[in-house]
Structures are given as structure tokens and as C-alpha cells.
Amino acid sequence: MARVPKPVALTLTGLGKPRTAEGGVSARVEEDRELVRRAQKEDKEAFEELVRRHQNRVFAVAGGILRNREDVEDIAQQVFLKAYFSIKRFDQRAAFSTWLYKITVNECWDLLRKKKVRPLVFEAELSEEQSQVYQASSEQSDGRPDTSERLAAQEQVEELMSCLDERDRTMLVLKEVQGFSVEEIAGMMEINANTVKVRLFRARQRITERTKRRRGVTGR
């Protein structure tokens, strides 16, 4: 049995930050395709390069779904292990990134089902006004995080997001936090792109309505 290459230094750099537009996307996809072809011929350096290219995105996707950073690290290692042993069966009909992130989402869901916990809510899921309050509560005058206030703010957002099911929460994180396109999310979750659009629209509506109701009750 082929030995799994020593993991490339996996870090949590950029966890939870949205993607920015980059040039040469099609060229990068083609480079990935060539690396995949080489990895399918047991070229370990090619697979390690794929890990280097996509490790931060795998961490970010997992971090947008899971609550615990240790879980994120474990899932990331599991994702690349599964990708390594499955890459010969990957037919490249989809982009390597879509295939890899779909594995990531599925592994996260499997873990959540086993642990029966809710996904983490990120700051980017808040409205602009809520985000400003959240950021303000996250720092003291010395610039260090105020853990108690940050947790209180996060709990408030968790309550707002509790009206969404696991799948809709995941879609919202992938779209608003990680910056994936509707088409990419559809590929990862194996559903129609129009279904993704409808579910995202309804999810945002439900959060907006819940926010209005809370403000009405609290008099804000």
C-alpha cells in the first residue's frame, strides 16, 4: 500500500476569512488538473503541492461549519488522507477544488452528526451594524480580545441563526463567509444551483425576520 506523504505544514492561517477575487483562475484550475494527473500516477510531490494550494481553503470551509478548532485540524487531516487514497478514482469532471471541498463538507457533517453539535457562527454572517458591535466587543483598549463579551456577542448570533437547519447554515457560511459562488456550493452539496439560490434567499429572510422580532421584543 502506498505510503501517505508527510503532511505539509497545515495551519489555521486565514481561517474564516472570505475569498478575494484572483486573476488567472482558469490557469490555476488547469495547473490543478495537471497536478492531479501526476498524483494519480503516484507522484507524491504533485499531491503535496495540491495540499499546499488548498490547505487553507479546507481549513476555512471546515472552520465555517465546526465549533472546535481541534476538530477543524482533525477534519483537515482526514480530508487530505481521504483525498490521497481516492484521487485515482477522481475523474476530473469537476474541478479538484470542488471535489476536495465536497469531501470537507461531508466529513464535517459526519462529525456533527456523531457529536450532535451545532455549527459555529462567524462574524461575517452578521449585518453590518451587528458586525460593528461584535468587533467593538471583541477588543479592549489594549487591543486584546475580551473573551466574555465576545462569547456573549457570539451567543446572541447563535440564537439568531438557530432558526436555520444545518444545511442552510452551511450554505450561508460557504457563501457569505468563504465567498464560494452559488455554482461551487451546488457542486459541493450535490444540488441544483437554483435550489441553492432559493435556500440562501429564504435563510436570509428568516434571519432578518427573527432580528426584527427580537428588536420588537427588546424595544431596540
Image (tube, rainbow, N blue to C red):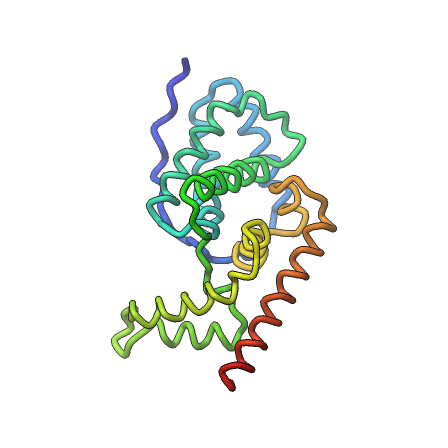
Q: Is residue 34 visible?
A: yes
For the point 27% across and 79% down, the residue is: 141
Q: Is residue 94 left or right of residue 88?
A: right
- Residue 112 vertical position relative to residue 46 in the rendered view, above or below: below
Q: Residue at x 37, y 19 (%)?
A: 3
Which of these two is toward me, 96 or 73?
73
Residue 14 located left or right of residue 167 = left
Q: Residue furthest right?
A: 194
Q: Residue at x 51, y 68 (%)?
A: 126
Q: From what the image shows, is residue 201 above or below residue 59?
A: below
- Given the current orientation, which residue lies at the most extreme bottom position? 219
Query: Seen from this angle, which residue lies furthest front?
Result: 217
Q: Position of residue 168 (x, y in %)?
A: 59, 53
Q: Is residue 21 visible?
A: no
| Location of residue 213 in the rendering, given as x and y in whole percent from the top left corner | 57, 76
The N terminus - image quarter: top left
Total marks drawn? 0
The x and y percentages for residue 199 are 67, 55
On the image, which quarter does residue 152 sit in? bottom left
Residue drawn at the location 46% of the way across and 26% of the way down: 84
Residue 12 horizontal side relative to residue 29, left or right: left
Establish if 207 lies above or below 180.
Answer: below
Location of residue 177 in the rendering, given as x and y in whole percent from the top left corner: 52, 58
Q: Residue furthest left?
A: 142
Q: Is residue 11 found left or right of 33 in the rendered image? A: left
